[in-house]
C-alpha cells in the first residue's frame, strides 16, 4: 500500500458518504472509548501511570542500541535465533528462507502489524506459501481480501450482517448473525490450520532485554496456539519494542490493555523465552525473532521525532480521532492509519509520498489526551508539515522527502501574507477595504468556493475592531 | 497552562494588553469590543496596540514557520510592558502561550527566544482571565434563554481551559445552560483544513450541527470565532436557526441595562 494525495482525496470524498461504515465506526469506537475511560477511572492514578509509561519508553529509547544488543545476546543464549532486517524485503526473505529450509508451505499467523508493514502474506503467496490469519478480526479482513482497517480491531468497519454475508460467500456457511455461531465457523476453519501449519508467525508487544523475553498479549488464545503448536515460531518486531527490564513491563501492559480495549489485563498473556527444551513435550522446535528497522532508525536520529517510536500500538488515538471515524482506515492507504499513522507513515514512506497525511488533521489534540505514552501528535504533525514545506538542501534531510511538498504557489501566498501582516499600515488599509467591499469578494473561486459548498461565507464587518476602538468617544 | 495551576494567576492588574486576533478584527469586531468593555467594567485599563495584526498561526500550521516567526516577532514587540496580554480566542492564545517559545527556540536568536518565553507566560485567554483573574460577577439583565457552549479544541486542550466559559454562563440568572452532546469533539474548522479538506470538514460539522439541535439550545456560544464561523456557516446554509454568537458579545448583551437578546 502506497499513500497518494490524489487517491486520498478521492477515497475521502467517497467514504465520508459511506453511512454504513460511519455508523459502524462511530458505534464501535464509542464503545471502546467508554470502556477505556472506565478502565482508567477505575485505577488510582491513571495520569501518573501514563507518566510512568512515557518515562519507560523514553528511557528505553535513549538506550536503544545497547538494549537491542543485550536482547540479542540474551535471546541467543537461550536458543532463540535473532535476525536483523533493515528493510521489509530483507525481513520477508528471512521468513522465506526459514520456510524453504524446513519445507514449510503453510503458515498460521497471530496479529502482527509489522507483518502488514512487510506485506508478508502476498509475499509468501508469491512463493507458493499459504499464510492464514488466526486472529478473528484479521481472519475476517483476510476473507475480504483487505488489510486491517484499524490497528487493534482489523474489521471494525464491518457490522455483523456484513461479516455474515462474507462468511456465507467465502466459507460457504449458512447466513447467520449469531456471533457464537459465526465464531464457531471461524474456529472450525482455523483448528485444522493450526494442526497443519509448519510455522506460526506473531508480532511482539514488548521484548525484554535483561531477561531475553518476548511478551505477547492477545484475547482469543490464537496467539498461544500459533506460538506453541507449529514446529517453528517466528516473531516479528519493530526495533522500538525493546524495553530494559522485566519490571518495566507491568506498567506498559496495564496501559496497553486499558488503552486498547478497556481491559485491565488481556485474556492471554504469552511469555516466550525458549524453544522447546529436551524435557518438554510441546512447544516449537525453533523460535526466531526478526527485528525490523524500515526507517525507524532515521526517526530515532531526531530527538523530537523520536517520540513517534514511543507508540505501543494500542489504537486509542484512532478511537477518538474525529477524522478517522469519518473516513475509515482504508482512506489513508497506509498500514498505520489515524493519528499515529499520520506521523509514522510520512516518516517511514517519506514526505514526498505520504506528506499529505500530515495536513489531514485539525490539530484538535483529542489523541494526546488518550495516548498512554503521551505522544504529542499535533506538535509532531506541525513539525512534519514544516519539514515537508521548507526548502531543504539535498543530503540535509532529517526526514525522508523533506522540502518535497513545497510549492511555489503556496510559498508565494505565505510570503505575501507575511508582508501584509508585518506592515500595520498595509494591514489596516486592506482590512478596511475588505469591510467596505465585503459583499463583493469572489465566492466562486479559490478557498471561498470550497468554503461555500456547505457553509455560508463569512462577511467582513463594515468596521474592523481597530476602527471601532479608535473611534470610541472615550478612548 | 495557567488554569491547571491557579497559583500562576496574577493579582488583578490595573492595566492589560488586548490582542484582538485577525478574525475578531475583521469578521467579529463586536466580540472584541465586548471583550474590551467587559474588562474595563471591572476597572481595568485596556491597551490595544493599533499596529497589531495576526498571531502567525496560519502559516505556522501550514509548515511555513519562518513567515509565522516574522509576524509573531512583530506582535511581541508591541506588548513590551510586563502586564497580561488577554486574547479572546483559545486558538490564538494557544499559539502565543504554547507555541511561541517553541517557534523561537531554535538557537538562532537567544534573546528573542527568551523574550518569547517571557511574553508567552503573560498570555491569557479571555474567559479564563475574566473568571480567574478579574473574578467577575455578572448580573443578568436578559429574558430566559437556553444556551449551549462549544468548547474549542485549543482552548480545551492546549490552554487547558475547561470550566471558565461555562462558569461565566452560569452566573447569568435567566440563562439555562444546556450541555452540548459530544461537546469535546472538534467541529472540523482547523483553519486551512476547512478548505483544504472540505469533505472531512463537512462530515465533522454536520455532526456538530446535529448535536447543537439535540441540545435544545436557542443560542450557541464559543470562545473561538473560527469554530463559530464553521458551525454558524453550516447552520445558516442548512437553515438551522440557532443563534450563534461569540461568548464575550453574548455576555456583554446580557449584562447591559435593558438587555433584550
Image: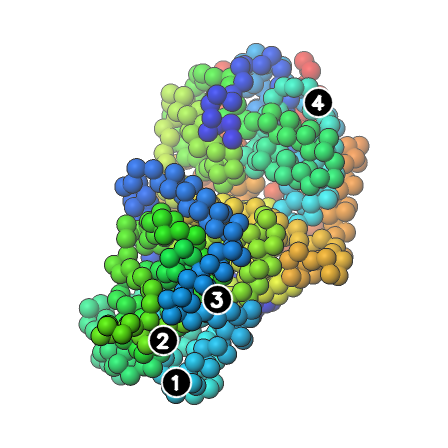
Q: Which residue is drawn at the image coordinates 38% and 20% (left, top)?
A: B173
Q: Is residue B257 above or below residue B176?
A: above
From the top left corner, tell me how far across and down residue A171 is, in percent.
28, 81
Which of the chains bears the disc numbered 2?
A
**Quadrant in the rendering for residue A180:** bottom left
Of labels 3 and 2, earlier in sequence is 2
Q: Classify mark 4: helix, strand or loop.
A: loop
Q: Which mark is residue B76?
A: none
Q: Nearer the viewer, mark 3 or mark 2?
A: 2
- Mark 1 highlights which residue? A102
- Mark 3–mark 2 Cα distance, whole angstroms, equals 16 Å
Q: Are marks 3 and 4 in contact (CB under 8 Å)?
A: no
Which residue position holds label 2?
A: A286
Q: Residue at x 46, y 58 (%)?
A: A70
Disc 3/disc 4 C-alpha distance (Å) = 54 Å
Q: Nearer the viewer, mark 3 or mark 4?
A: 3
Q: Secondary structure at mark 2?
A: strand
Q: For mark 3, give the secondary structure.
A: strand
Q: Label 1, label 2: how many angstroms apart (C-alpha)?
A: 10 Å
Examine the rendering and report whether any part of residue A124 can be seen: yes
Q: Are marks 3 and 1 in contact (CB under 8 Å)?
A: no
Which chain is mark 1 on?
Answer: A
Question: Label 4, on which residue?
Answer: B80
Determine the image quadrant of residue B80: top right
The answer to whether residue A226 is above or below residue A352 is: below
Residues at marks 1 and 2 touching, judged by CB atoms closer than 8 Å: yes
Judging by the rendered image, the residue that carries numbered circle 3 is A291
Find residue B47 and report its horizontal and vertical position in percent. Answer: 67, 19
- Name the residue rendered at 73%, 44% in the picture: B66
Residues flagged by tags 1 and 2 on a common chain: yes
Respond whether the residues carrying marks 2 and 4 are from the same subunit.
no
In 3D space, how far apart are the residues under numbered discs 2 and 4 (Cα atoms)? 69 Å
Amino acid at each position: 500500500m502506497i499513500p497518494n494525495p490524489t487517491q486520498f482525496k478521492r477515497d475521502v470524498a467517497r467514504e465520508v458518504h459511506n453511512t454504513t461504515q460511519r455508523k459502524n465506526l462511530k458505534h464501535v469506537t464509542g464503545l471502546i472509548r467508554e470502556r477505556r475511560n472506565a478502565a482508567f477511572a477505575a485505577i488510582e492514578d491513571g495520569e501518573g501511570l501514563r507518566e510512568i509509561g512515557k518515562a519507560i519508553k523514553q528511557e528505553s529509547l535513549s538506550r536503544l542500541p545497547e538494549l537491542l544488543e543485550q536482547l540479542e545476546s540474551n535471546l541467543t543464549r537461550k536458543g532463540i535465533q535473532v535476525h536483523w532486517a533493515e528493510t521489509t524485503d530483507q525481513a520477508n526473505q528471512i521468513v522465506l528462507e526459514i520456510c524453504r529450509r524446513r519445507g514449510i508451505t503453510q503458515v498460521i499467523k497471530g496479529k502482527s502489524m509489522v507483518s502488514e508493514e512487510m506485506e508478508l502474506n502476498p509475499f509468501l503467496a508469491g512463493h507458493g506459501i499459504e499464510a492464514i490469519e488466526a486472529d478473528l478480526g484479521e481472519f475476517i479482513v483476510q476473507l475480504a481480501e483487505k488489510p486491517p482497517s484499524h490497528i487493534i480491531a482489523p474489521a471494525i468497519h464491518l457490522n455483523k450482517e456484513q461479516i455474515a454475508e462474507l462468511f456465507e460467500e467465502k466459507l460457504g456457511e449458512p447466513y447467520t448473525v449469531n456471533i457464537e455461531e459465526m465464531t464457531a465457523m471461524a474456529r472450525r476453519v482455523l483448528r485444522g490450520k493450526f494442526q497443519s501449519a509448519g510455522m506460526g508467525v506473531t508480532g511482539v508487544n514488548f521484548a525484554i532485554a535483561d531477561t531475553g523475553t518476548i511478551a505477547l498479549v492477545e484475547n482469543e488464545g490464537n496467539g498461544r496456539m500459533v506460538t506453541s503448536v507449529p514446529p517453528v515460531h517466528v516473531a516479528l518486531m519493530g526495533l522500538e519494542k525493546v524495553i530494559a527490564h522485566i519490571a518495566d513491563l507491568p506498567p506498559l501492559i496495564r496501559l496497553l490493555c486499558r488503552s486498547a480495549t478497556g481491559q485491565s489485563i488481556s485474556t492471554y498473556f504469552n511469555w516466550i523465552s525458549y524453544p522447546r527444551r529436551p524435557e518438554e513435550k510441546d512447544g516449537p522446535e525453533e523460535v526466531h525473532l526478526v527485528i525490523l528497522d524500515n526507517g525507524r532508525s532515521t526517526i530515532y536520529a531526531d530527538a523530537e521525532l523520536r517520540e513517534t517510536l514511543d507508540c505501543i500500538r494500542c489504537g486509542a488515538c484512532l478511537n477518538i480521532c474525529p477524522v478517522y471515524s469519518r473516513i475509515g482506515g482504508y482512506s489513508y492507504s497506509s498500514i498505520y492509519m489515524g493519528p499515529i499513522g499520520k506521523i509514522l507513515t510520512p516518516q517511514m514512506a517519506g514526505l514526498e509520498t505520504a506528506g499529505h497525511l500530515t495536513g489531514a488533521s485539525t490539530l484538535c489534540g483529542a489523541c494526546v489526551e488518550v495516548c498512554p505514552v503521551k505522544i504529542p501528535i499535533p506538535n509532531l504533525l506541525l513539525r512534519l508539515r514544516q519539514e515537508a514545506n521548507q526548502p531543504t538542501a539535498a543530503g540535509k534531510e532529517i526526514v525522508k522527502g523533506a522540502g518535497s511538498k513545497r510549492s511555489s504557489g503556496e510559498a508565494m501566498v505565505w510570503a505575501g501574507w507575511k508582508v501584509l501582516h508585518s506592515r500595520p499600515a498595509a494591514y489596516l488599509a486592506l482590512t478596511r477595504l475588505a469591510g467596505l467591499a465585503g459583499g463583493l469578494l469572489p465566492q466562486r473561486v479559490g478557498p471561498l468556493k470550497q468554503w461555500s459548498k456547505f457553509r455560508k461565507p463569512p462577511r467582513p464587518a463594515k468596521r474592523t475592531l481597530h476602527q471601532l476602538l479608535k473611534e470610541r468617544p472615550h478612548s | 497552562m495557567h488554569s491547571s495551576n491557579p497559583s500562576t494567576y496574577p493579582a488583578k492588574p490595573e492595566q492589560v494588553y488586548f490582542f484582538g486576533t485577525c478574525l475578531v478584527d475583521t469578521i467579529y469586531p463586536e466580540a472584541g469590543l465586548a471583550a474590551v468593555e467587559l474588562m474595563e467594567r471591572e476597572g481595568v485599563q485596556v491597551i490595544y496596540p493599533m499596529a497589531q495584526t495576526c498571531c502567525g498561526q496560519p502559516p505556522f500550521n501550514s509548515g511555513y514557520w519562518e513567515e509565522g516567526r516574522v509576524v509573531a516577532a512583530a506582535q511581541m514587540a508591541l506588548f513590551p510592558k510586563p502586564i497580561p496580554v488577554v486574547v479572546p480566542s483559545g486558538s490564538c492564545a494557544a499559539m502565543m502561550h504554547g507555541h511561541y517559545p517553541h517557534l523561537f527556540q531554535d538557537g538562532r536568536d537567544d534573546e528573542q527566544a527568551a523574550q518569547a518565553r517571557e511574553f508567552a507566560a503573560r498570555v491569557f485567554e479571555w474567559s479564563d482571565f475574566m473568571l480567574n483573574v478579574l473574578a467577575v460577577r455578572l448580573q443578568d439583565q436578559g429574558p430566559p434563554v437556553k444556551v449551549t457552549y462549544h468548547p474549542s479544541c485549543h482552548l480545551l486542550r492546549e490552554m487547558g481551559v475547561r470550566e471558565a466559559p461555562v462558569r461565566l454562563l452560569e452566573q447569568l440568572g435567566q440563562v439555562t445552560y444546556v450541555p452540548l452532546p459530544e461537546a469535546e469533539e472538534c467541529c472540523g474548522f482547523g483553519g486551512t483544513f476547512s478548505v483544504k479538506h472540505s469533505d472531512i470538514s463537512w462530515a465533522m460539522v454536520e455532526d456538530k450541527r446535529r448535536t447543537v439541535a439535540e441540545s435544545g439550545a436557542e443560542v450557541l456560544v464559543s470562545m473561538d470565532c473560527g469554530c463559530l464561523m464553521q458551525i454558524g456557516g453550516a447552520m445558516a446554509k442548512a437553515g438551522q436557526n440557532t443563534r450563534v454568537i461569540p461568548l464575550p458579545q453574548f455576555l456583554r448583551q446580557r449584562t447591559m441595562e435593558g438587555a433584550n437578546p
